[in-house]
Image (cartoon, rainbow, N blue to C red):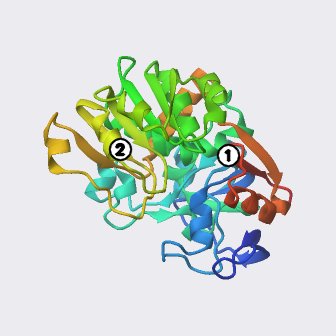
Amino acid sequence: MKIKSYAAMEAGKALELYEYDAPELSAEEVEVEVEYCGVCHSDLSMIDNEWGISRYPTIAGHEVIGRVSAMGEAAKSKGLSVGQRVGIGWTAKSCQHCDACINGEQVNCEQGSIPTILNNGGFAEKLRADWQWVIPLPENLDAATAGPLLCGGITVFKPLLMSNITATSRVGVIGIGGLGHIAIKILRAMGAEVVAFSSTPDKKQSILEMGADEVINSRDPEALKSQAGRFDLIISTVAVDLDWKPYFDALAPQGKFHTVGAVLKPFEVSAFQLIMGDKALTGSSTGSPGQLRSLLKLASRRDIAPRVEYFPMSKINEALDHVRAGKANYRVVLKADF
């Protein structure tokens, strides 16, 4: 069987239409026909081999919404059915028998979980993943906007679970872009107080409309200083180095500063900033199948939908350039048109 896709043939090059031979489905695999696929900065990093783990041809795309088109023998008894609408996120495979997997920490699989992009991803007419990572889509969740929840959404949802965030919590979000705006929507749905730290004053009204209780100009030192001691959790979604001290000062006792942005420079924080007040610096990657299911249930119940703009998949290089240039209206979603 041949599958059509758009692939990077080498680092940094425009994607090309590419057909590859797909082997017979393994017993645990599910094949999904792609309807929509979000574009994430991680796709650009893999296309450009910024992390040094890419293999070419690279078929990126890992925020997939589609319908089950085929299943391996073992997958047929796992609650999925042909024609069912499902999602596939960052992870495609994990061993399911190591201690981490048994404990529900499949992303930390001791055998090494396999990213969707390294398993031939969703910039294609079809893709495959093991059945655990094929997440049923609630019927009332909008398929056209749901894709970014499977990566951007779970990336900011997991820290809320790790920090036991409730309706009584006050949470700060640094960077109101693709990840940050979803964090605001999730926190609003959970009833928490949410404060946005943004370097773009022009976004203030739209950020408030998303559900933020307050917007702080992150370029204003006095505004940052005024936040001292306020937050149970601050989530940083930015991938650039900042002056982090005001944010550590903004933590309440036992507060956590949690990064999901891939900042390449080490964080500078003194021991006493953590010791005084029992504070912590933490981080996380993507979530487990169970956490993904929980997020989609929450999104369907509380009408959480990322802000997206659409491109046909045949215009994928235009879409990637749009994201690279920082012009995306929060998230970009490709509509399959093979």
Q: Alpha-carbon neighbours of circle 1 within 10 Å: few (<14), some, or many (≥20)?
A: many
What residue type is disc 1 on? Arg
Q: Quadrant of the N terminus?
A: bottom right
Looking at the image, can residue 72 be seen?
Answer: no
Q: List x then y, in percent, for residue 68.
A: 68, 50
The residue closer to the viewer here, 101 or 323, is 323
Q: List x then y, in percent, for residue 334.
A: 76, 52
Work out whether 40 lies above or below 251.
below
**Residue 258, numbered label:** 2
Residue occupying image coordinates x 66% and y 82%: 10
Cα–Cα span, label 1 and label 2: 22 Å
Q: Quadrant of the C terminus?
A: bottom right
**Residue 57, numbered label:** none
Work out whether 270 lies above or below 13.
above
Residue occupying image coordinates x 74% and y 40%: 144
Q: List x then y, in percent, for residue 3.
A: 75, 70
Local secondary structure at mark 1 = strand
**Residue 331, numbered label:** 1
Location of residue 277 by image quarter: top left
Marks 1 and 2, the one that precedes in the sequence? 2
- Would residue 95 be found to the left or right of residue 21 on screen? left
Q: Alpha-carbon neighbours of circle 2 within 10 Å: few (<14), some, or many (≥20)?
A: many
Residue occupying image coordinates x 67% and y 31%: 141
Local secondary structure at mark 2 = strand
- Would residue 308 be found to the left or right of residue 53 on screen? right
Q: Are marks 1 and 2 in contact (CB under 8 Å)?
A: no
Residue occupying image coordinates x 52% and y 46%: 78
Q: List x then y, in percent, for residue 314.
A: 85, 62
Location of residue 41 by image quarter: bottom right
What residue type is disc 2 on? His
Location of residue 299 by image quarter: top right
- Would residue 313 be found to the left or right of residue 30 on screen? right
